[in-house]
Amino acid sequence: MSLQKFCERPVVTIAPEQTIIEACQLLREMNLGCLVVEEEGKLCGILTDRDIALKVTEARKDPEQTKVQEVMTPNPARISVDKSLHELTALMHSHHVRRVPIVDGGDKVMGLVTLDDLLVLLSEEISDLSQSVSAAIFRKPVDNSEEAAFNIDLLTRRLVAATRWLRGQAQPMENP
């Protein structure tokens, strides 16, 4: 599956020299949990509400004086739009992150994928799988072996994909 699907929503960005107060206002207005930090149109960091809670509030820094660049995660994990969903989940797992900017070849942010986005996608896949299984069980028998083989192959691929998601594996299973 292409990551292009995650590039349909506009990405909300902030500049590194802006203040944490400005970032908080943007987070509240847009009902977001993170902002992509861009400098000269290129990804340079990511700022999450957790960053603000731990690095500003808990540290008792003045949010009107503290700049985004002091709090953001610089050089965050990112993924190219031409990579696969499996590569994305592997990246998220290996870097222990819940949000990953999707970039083009020049580090221009094209989208942002979150763990919540992946959970929605997983639920859609499981729903499709259950519908396929239900249809296979409750419909009349297939008339030819070619159609039966196709149905079995489709069910197997969906089961393998769902199993990978549930196990958190990004690599293909050896014996599907």
Image (cartoon, grey):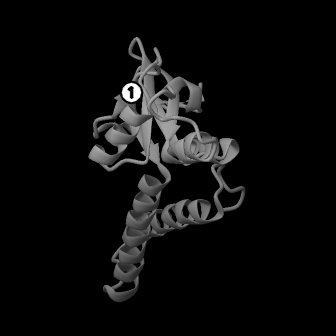
Instruction: Give left or right: position of 135 versus 169.
Output: left
Q: Amino acid at mark 1?
A: Ile
In the rendering, at what x and y percent does residue 166 appear? 59, 66
Q: Nearer the viewer, residue 46 or 16?
A: 16
Q: Nearer the viewer, residue 75 or 21?
A: 21
Viewer-proximal residue, 114 or 152?
Answer: 114
- Note whether 9 is above or below 156 in the view shown: above
- The residue at the point 70 percent across, 61 percent down is 175
Looking at the figure, which quarter contains the N terminus?
top left
Q: How many marks?
A: 1
Which quarter of the rendered picture does the C terminus lie within? bottom right
Residue at x-position 46% and y-position 61%: 119
Check disc 1 and report the residue beneath it.
14
Image height check: is 24 above or below 172? above
The residue drawn where x is 38% and y is 73% is 132
Residue, x 57% and y 32% (percent of image)? Answer: 71
Q: Secondary structure at mark 1?
A: strand
Q: Position of residue 34 (x, y in %)?
A: 44, 42
The answer to whether residue 27 shows anywhere in this view is: yes
Q: 19 and 35: which one is in front?
A: 19
Percent x, y of residue 163: 59, 66
Q: Is residue 84 visible?
A: no
**121 horizontally vs 70: left or right:** left
